[in-house]
């Protein structure tokens, strides 16, 4: 019996030692998953940070403090009413993306990190949008996002956090402002349409005036060319008349009576032409000696033949 009791006592002791060893192993060996970092506290004071993988602690003295997620996280910022610089009320909500870069500071520099980031973002949204007019805030979301990113990232840096992006999801003015903006937009479109119509009419008038100007220039050029041709024709007629007069003068100097008849017949014929072409004359009755006129014409022919013969002799 004593031997059996001694064996039982030895077995219990061995079992206790085995259980104690297992507990020590559990307390000493830690497996940190990828994407996380754990802080180690010794008697309640932070000592170091465990990276992903198999890590070891000193049992009883060391314990895991905080398990920190190191992956990028999305923070939804709830909607809030914001007053712009021109006293317009808009509803604004946003979303932020952040990543913890220092597990120790994220664990021990701030209590409830997500709540702190949310409140910090809401405060800065009110500040940034409140410094802008309504039209400016609605048309410059990129500028708002950039300002919010700079301010929030700088403010959260002591917490071991890197804010990567801040995006305004929606800026919604009240219904009455939406209606006023719709009327303003319609008025702007009507204004642009009227300006385009006026520009078209102006361009049309300019083109029409330029066409009339071009036509007048071409018409003036035509009149100038016609006047030049008329002057040239009159000049040639005058030269022909001068030559004829010279021929007749030479014939008279030689004693040819037909030259005098030529002048008389010419003036007589011109007078008849002027009387016949007058718009006030309907019927003209003039005594006319046809034989005298024919004789004058015959004299003209004789003068022309004499002149031609003289040129041949020359």
Image (cartoon, rainbow, N blue to C red):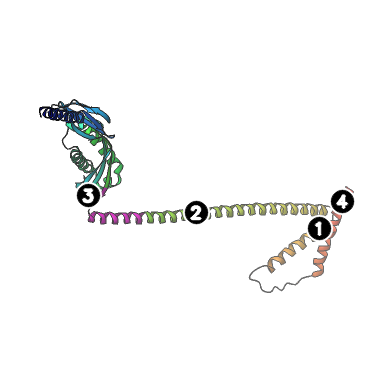
Residue 158 seen from this side: no
Work out whether residue 236 or residue 264 is closer to the camera in this orientation and state it: 236
- Mark 4 or 2, closer to the camera: 2
Q: Label 1 vs label 3: CA separation?
A: 116 Å
Nearer the observer, disc 1 or disc 2? 2
Say whether residue 177 is magenta: yes
What mark, if any, has residue 235 been given in the picture?
A: none
List the residue tagged with mark 3: 91
N-term-proximal mark, 3 vs 2: 3
For the residues bearing labels 4 and 1, Cβ distance under 8 angstroms: no
Which residue, given by chain and number where applicable, does mark 2 sit on?
207
The disc at residue 310 is 4
Q: Residue at x 26, y 48 (%)?
A: 170
The CA span between labels 4 and 3 is 118 Å
Disc 1 is placed on an element classified as helix
Element type where label 2 sits in the image: helix
């Amino acid at each position: 019996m004593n031997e059996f009791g001694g064996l039982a006592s030895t077995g219990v002791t061995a079992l206790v030692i085995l259980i104690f060893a297992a507990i020590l192993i559990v307390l000493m060996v830690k497996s940190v998953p990828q994407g996380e970092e754990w802080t180690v506290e010794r008697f309640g004071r932070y000592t170091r940070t465990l990276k992903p993988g198999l890590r070891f602690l000193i049992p009883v003295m060391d314990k895991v403090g905080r398990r920190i997620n190191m992956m990028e996280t999305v923070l939804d910022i709830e909607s809030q009413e914001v007053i712009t610089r021109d006293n317009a009320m808009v509803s604004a909500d946003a979303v932020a993306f952040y990543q913890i870069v220092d597990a120790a500071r994220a664990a021990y520099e701030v209590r409830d990190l997500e709540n702190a980031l949310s409140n910090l973002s809401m405060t800065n949204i009110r500040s940034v949008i409140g410094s802008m007019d309504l039209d400016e805030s609605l048309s410059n979301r990129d500028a708002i996002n950039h300002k919010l990113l700079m301010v929030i990232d700088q403010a959260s840096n002591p917490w071991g956090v890197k804010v990567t992006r801040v995006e305004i999801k929606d800026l919604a003015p009240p219904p009455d402002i939406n209606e006023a903006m719709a009327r303003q937009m319609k008025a702007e479109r009507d204004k642009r349409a009227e300006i385009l119509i006026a520009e078209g009419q102006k361009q049309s008038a300019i083109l029409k005036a330029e066409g009339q100007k071009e036509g007048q220039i071409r018409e003036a050029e035509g009149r100038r060319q016609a006047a030049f041709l008329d002057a040239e024709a009159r000049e040639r007629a005058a030269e022909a008349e001068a030559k004829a007069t010279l021929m007749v003068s030479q014939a008279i100097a030689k004693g040819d009576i037909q030259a005098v008849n030529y002048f008389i017949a010419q003036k007589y014929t011109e007078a008849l032409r002027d009387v016949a072409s007058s718009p006030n004359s309907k019927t003209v009755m003039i005594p006319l000696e046809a034989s005298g006129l024919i004789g004058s014409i015959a004299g003209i022919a004789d003068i022309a033949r004499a002149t031609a013969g003289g040129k041949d002799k020359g």
